[in-house]
Amino acid sequence: MDPRPDNRDDIRDFLARRRAQLTPEEVGLPAGGRRRVPGLRREEVAILAGVSTEWYTRLEKGHIGGVSEDVLDAVARTLRLDDDERTYLFDLAKAAQPGPATRRRRKAVDVPPRIQWLLDSMTLSAAYVTNSRLDIVAANALTRALFSPLYASPTTDRRGRPNFARFWFLDDTSRDFADDWEGGAATTAALLRAEAGRYPDDKALRELVGELSTVSAEFRTQWATHRVRVHHGGVKRLHHPEVGLLELTYQPLDLPISARETHSLTIYTAEPGTPDEDRLKLLASWAATPARQNDESPETHRPSR
């Protein structure tokens, strides 16, 4: 008996939503007469992908195990999936395959000391490591200063480990901290959705999604969109309680610590020669002198905006 969770609902919802988002004109088909549902019909996707309507209907119902990569490629092209969505579709197919290797449960691993040494060496950048559930499992001093609202949040666990998803959806102060809360919420849910497709047997991840779905209406809304995000990076604006508005660039990188769990290294930096760099340096200076925090904070020397 296969103990792994059934991911057919995820496959069905994902493919049906993507099909509904395409119009006949976008794929070179005549609009035809009145349509009962938005987007393409199943038979239209089947024709464009070069498969039978019966076969595609079965695929959209979640029966994806054993489907060849060529066929998945054809479906991905037909539905105009981007790179992240294509990766997600292939992850769903891989997770649906039976076998001992795919049924193995992932276990949390400790971050090796060499990774912490690497983080601590980055004194002018906020650098941290997250797992697939968006827990911060290792961080340098500037990260703890930059994301002080997360570390101070009641959503942080007993070990002092913040979780971006819980902070974003379960702590109202996240709306004051993030300049674009809605965009951050969408990205956070999309990252979790991609990981859930990749590792449907991750019990801790399922429990996190269940918790957020139960408590947060905003998360339920984002989760229902079935958006996925695998690779992300760019610019983020944060309203720090001590140094004010910060516009920072950030870039996540895959960090192959262990085959048993995925990790990502994320680095936040400021553009050189900008007031944001001045504020980040001030925050770094404050983070490097914890003994003086009670006597002198960045608020005392807040740079002009």
Image (cartoon, helix red, strand yellow):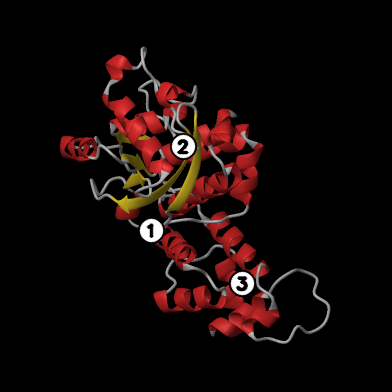
Q: Foreground: 115 or 222?
A: 115
Identified by mark 2, the residue type is Phe
Give the residue type that dot 3 points to: Thr
Residue indicated by mark 2: 164
In the rendered structure, which disc, 3 or 1, sits on the residue that comes first in sequence?
3
Residue at mark 1: 98
Estimate the spatial distance between the alpha carbons at disc 3 and disc 1, rounded to whole Å.
22 Å
Q: Does residue 180 appear left or right of residue 281 in this picture?
A: right
Q: Is residue 218 above or below residue 36?
A: above
The image quadrant of residue 69 is bottom left
Q: Secondary structure at mark 3?
A: helix
- Locate residue 114 relative to residue 54 in the image: left or right: left
Q: Could you say whether the residue bearing mark 2 is in a helix, strand or loop?
A: helix
Report x, y in % for residue 50.
Answer: 54, 85
Residue 268, percent from left and from top: 36, 44
Number of marks in the rendered image: 3
Q: Between marks 2 and 1, how big is the CA–CA gap? A: 32 Å
Residue 113: name its quadrant: top left
Q: Earlier in the sequence, mark 3 or mark 2?
A: 3
* Nearest-to-viewer mark from 3 and 1: 3
Q: Which mark is residue 8?
A: none
Residue indicated by mark 3:
57
Question: Is residue 171 at all visible to an observer of this figure?
Answer: no
* Residue at the image point whose x is 42% and y is 69% from the top: 66
Assign a secondary structure to mark 1.
loop
Q: Which mark is in front, 2 or 1?
A: 2
Mark 3 or 2: the one toward you: 2
Q: Is residue 125 left or right of residue 15?
A: left
Disc 2 and disc 1 in contact, CB within 8 angstroms: no
**In the figure, 255 relative to 46: above or below?**
above
